[in-house]
Image (cartoon, grey):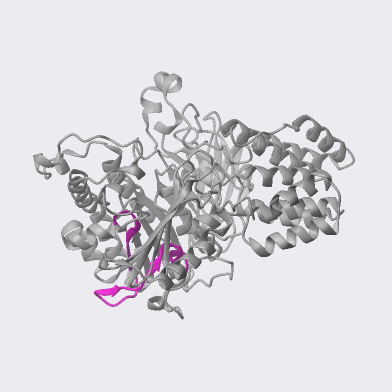
Amino acid sequence: MSIKKEIKVLLEKAQCSTTLADKIKEYEKACPMDLDLYWMKAEMLLLCGDGEEAYSIIKEGIRKNPYNMEMNTTARRVCKETKRYVEAVRYNAILTMLSSFFPQNVKADSQSEELLEQLAGESADMQSGGYQKELEYLNKHLGTAFGLLDHTYYSEGFHLIGTIYEDIYGNQKYNAYYDSIGLESLIPDIAQKHMSWWVTKLECLEVSKINTFTLGSESEYLLPVLQENLDALYGILSQDGRKAICQNKKAHHFEYYRLPPAAVLVSQKPLYIGNPIALKQEPNNKKLVLNIFVDGLSQKVIEEEKLSSLMPYTDAFFSKGVHCTNVYTNGEWTLPSIATYVTGVSSPNHMLIHNTVTNTLPADITVLAEYFKEQGYQTAKIDGDWRTTQSYGYGRGMDRIIYQNLSIGMTPERVVADVLEHLELMKETNQFVWMEIGDLHDIADGFSQKPSAQVKIPFEKRSVEEQNATSVKQNYSENKRAAYIEQMKWIDGHLAALYRYIEEHYKDDEVVISMFGDHGQGYLVKPDEHFLAEGRSKVGMLFRGGFEQGTVCNELISTCDYLPILCKLANIPLKGEEIDGRLPVFFGGEEEREYAVTDSIHPGDPYQAAIISKDSVFYFTSGGLVGYDGRFELGNYTCKVLERSGRECTDERKKQKYWKVLMQHIGGLVVYESDI
């Protein structure tokens, strides 16, 4: 019998013993990174009467893998035994969800009624307010399995206008109309009956519900004001006696007022106000930090066709900055890749990997927007990417979110227009803005391009091709590559207005502007290449702000490094949290990165990895398929080392060196052999 099986047998006996402790120590020595060690240790500690230590260890395990059945089962038991009934209900809900989604993997015995009764009994002695708060938390998040089934911003049938969204960490934002005139105004009866929420563009702000409010006295302010019903008036009075009686033009829509210090707002009926925005700038902060995320921006195509030919306006703008030419994404599709950009941690460490289950950004990591908000920046997110919504935690650190589903309306011309409007609105503050251009993705998705792009593609490159099930798994296609190139040029034309605005309103030392891609394209990877070849893994990344003209950085960079780079360029110190990103030497770091890792962790597919160094690449494909919880057996895996020239390297020492790097990277995802 294997050591692991012996441990399970001893745990089933439900007895604390030195034999059990010794067996776990023996197994840990053999397989120190096995995820199962967390729940096995926690179960042992619970048997031995140390519930608090068991709780501490199982929380670490849940942080490592929120989907795993054994981990959640043990967490439920530990929380129940230590009388943390709210958390016990949470893990029970997650188990119930997992069992419905993955019945072949998870068998959950629901304990909801028992746990809720125990919660009520435990809370009966508390003050009524505390009890009520816990029940409210449960009611808000039980239905979404505490965030793992939160499809708020992309599930059809919801209409979010007039609702306050709250994520599982308590961050709240009011969902309002962004447009002053929309379809709901022009055809109200049809809109009310048939329009799904995603037709409407949203403006999301943190709000307070008030009848009276007095502004601070240190500066002028912008104040967003919203009325849910236009059946009342509100008044604004300044200290010097100026006054106005106001009413919004549209319900559930923010109107902005520029108000003097200490102005007073008084309303007949309660209304909603956004957080007052002080019109002042911190001299040590940048006036503008703008992040231009271009979904699917491939460095391989840029190298082959030249940026000056593909995106001449972009090339001219960033010619006064730096082009990073050796950047590799950590994840090969948007969900894991952008999570890495904003946290600085790799996919195995943030675990936003699932295409059906909605995990959120890790709570113990400060995300990019939070760094800037804490330094006094006005932060905003303007895009239509449903994989980076508040459901995934991207409301954290964001003062203002403008969102509409990409396929409905957030095309480049509209995104640029909304960004320009926001920049002008907030120009007297220090601004941090995240925007997305998603239209390169249209090629893989099989959408029709604009006529001006279509006519520039040779007709022989427009033959009908078989469409793959998902954009990530596209086959190599010269036709799609030709369409991709014209799409890049079309996007560049719309970005020109944004570049012109920045150059007309800011000096270079007042800004940090970046452009970056999250992944390449499957249809750029040839049939004889590995799944994670450069066509899919190598991405574009450019910066402007205080650089010498024409600077190029050839240093090896991972997308994990974006957060350290951006904070460095904005003079924001990192907090010393454990992240995978590091500051490249080019930007002031102490040591160059030896490897960059790209991996693919898709439930139902083999795990795949590319480990890139200066002179070679290690490719790996597992024999076992990725399970519901992101874990997999190595099985009859394949691996090889290729020199940068493409010739296979037979040096076993180099292969073993890469192997150690890989095992360190994925140790917590491997399902270890049962005979250990």
Q: Is residue 120 left or right of residue 33?
A: right
Residue 181 at x, y percent in the picture = 37, 33
- Residue 366 higher or lower than 456, as above or below: below
Q: Quadrant of residue 189?
A: top left
Residues in magenta?
535-564
Is 335 included in the stretch rendered in magenta? Answer: no
**Quarter in which the C terminus is drawn:** bottom right
- Residue 150 higher or lower than 644, as above or below: above
Tell me which residue sits at (83%, 48%) in the image: 82
Q: Is residue 66 left or right of residue 198?
A: right
Nearest the viewer among 261 and 606 is 606
Count of marks overlaid on the render = 0
Nearest the viewer among 385 and 115 is 115
Residue 530 at x, y percent in the picture = 33, 54
Nearest the viewer among 394 and 21 is 21
Tell me which residue sits at (34%, 71%) in the image: 545
Tell me which residue sits at (45%, 78%) in the image: 589
Residue 90 at x, y percent in the picture = 70, 40
Q: Is residue 513 visible?
A: no
Q: Is residue 1 visible?
A: yes
Residue 508 at x, y percent in the picture = 32, 71
